[in-house]
Image (cartoon, grey):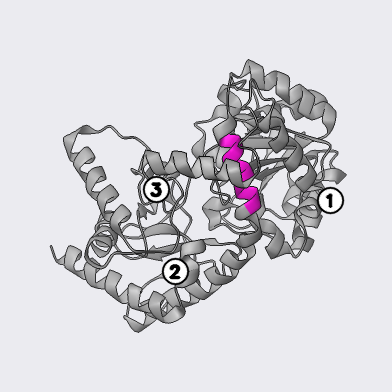
Amino acid sequence: MEQPQTETADERHGPGREAAGDPGATGSGRTSGGPERQDEDARRTEAFRGARRFLWRPPFDRDLGGLLSGLADDARGLGLAGERGDRYGDGVVAVLERRVAELLGFPDAAFFPTGTMAQQVALRCWAGRTGSPVVALHPLAHPERHERGALSAVSGLRTVHPCDGPGQLTAQDVRDFQEPFGTLMLELPLRDAGFTLPTWEELQEVVGAARERDAVVHFDGARLWDCAAHFGRDLAEVAQLADSVYVSFYKSLGGLSGAALAGPAELVEEARAWRHRYGGQVFQQYPAAVSALAGLERELPRLPSYAAHARVVARALREGFGAEGVPWFRVHPEVPHTHQFQVWLPYEPDVLTEAALRQAEKDGTVLFTRWAAAGAQGPGGVAFTEVTVGAAGLEWDARQVREAVGGFLEQVRDVAAG
């Protein structure tokens, strides 16, 4: 039977790099580590590239020739093949910036090479405008968990936490918090809490509570693209609740890299200056810009169907674990808020990771990839992974998911038995 939620682990020990469930990734994002690690990575790459069935196949899981030819196809499909590239952010990068600003309903947007940089710049700019270096955010938010303390170490900001649990930050948390702050940052969805989202009414109330305290609101919208269907609103209506929004192009949209900061024209103009100071004024970025535009064209309209099918997959996973008599498991949230969610099982992560690899080698099926320990916040002997449902996952019906669960658990028992 299912048990209450356990808090997630630090991504340094997580199931993959930034892309949840990345089948080709090493656990730390490093390719070094000696011959044993390199042999393991080579085995993993061969197994997953040779697999036939995925819930989500990452766009980077192709050889270099395939990636380059795919980029050229995208440029032609977008009518950009005859255009020149870019120099320091003009050309196709400027086209992308205008497109993002339009989608999110803001006057302007600036392209950044990374989301970490975009968000640091946004929060630094708001600190200067509000006169407060204090940023209130959830303790599981990305800057607190995965950016090595960059907000304080690099940008001189101080973070505070109006809540201390894995649940969503509430309006009452914001009103009751005793310390002053200039900016409230909300991550939508909250990845380390299982890609969860508040209701539309709850989100409005949290934003309103911040306004009552004369704070500005910034959305960490790395996966904001996934939120519209959950809220039953279009992207611009969601984004306009905030004073500024950061979005990623490789999360959910399948772009090569890059991010954008959208907001008032004066803020974005200042952000461009800080982008230069932070080393983000890259000479040419047209590959990332073309892939981002292709993602907006191709993947963005499909995200609601991925989220709907994630609910089918999550239910089938619960049914499969129950039918197999697994004594403890958790699919969180039970009804996914987006096309991504967590699965927890009562085994060591190395056992589950090896079982997933053997299933790929034996059956050509990738149900799960890397698993992580619960870490300091959870019990020993429990591991979790992140599940993403994409275009490839639409081909799976509930019966096939349940069958794949059986095949996976067969491998788990074999690995556990030694």
**Position of residue 136 measured from the top left corner of the image (x, y, whole percent):** 69, 39
Tell which residue pokes out farthest to the left in this image. 418
**Mark 3 vs 1, N-terminal side:** 3
In the picture, which quadrant includes the N terminus?
bottom left
Quick one: label 1, few (<14), some, or many (20+) residues within 10 Å? some
Instruction: Please state, as top left, top right, bottom left or bottom right, where the C terminus lies in the image.
Output: bottom left
- Looking at the rendered image, the disc whose residue lies closer to the viewer, 2 or 3, is 3
As helix, strand or loop, the secondary structure at mark 3 comes to: loop
Residue 392 versus residue 156 in the image, above or below: below
* Amino acid at dot 1: Gly
The residue that label 3 is drawn on is 61
Any part of residue 188 in sight: no
Which amino acid type is shown beneath numbered disc 2? Arg
- The segment highlighted magenta reads 288-297
Residue 151 versus residue 276 in the image, above or below:
below
Q: Which residue is mark 2?
A: 330
From the top left corner, tell me how far across and down residue 314 is, in percent. Answer: 49, 72
Q: Closest to the observer: 140 or 53?
A: 53
Please state the horizontal and vertical placement of residue 334, each as a whole percent of the image: 53, 71
The residue lying at 47 percent from left, 48 percent from top is 19
Query: How far apart are labels 3 and 1 at the CA level?
Result: 42 Å
Q: Is residue 282 left or right of residue 394?
A: right
Give the main secondary structure of the magenta stretch. helix
Q: Nearer the viewer, residue 103 or 118?
A: 103
Asked if the magenta segment contains residue 194, the reply would be no
Identify the residue position indicated by label 1 in the image. Answer: 208
The residue drawn where x is 76% and y is 55% is 172
Name the residue: 60% across, 22% down: 280
Q: Which mark is residue 166?
A: none
Q: Residues within 10 Å of mark 2 (few under 14, many from 20)?
A: many
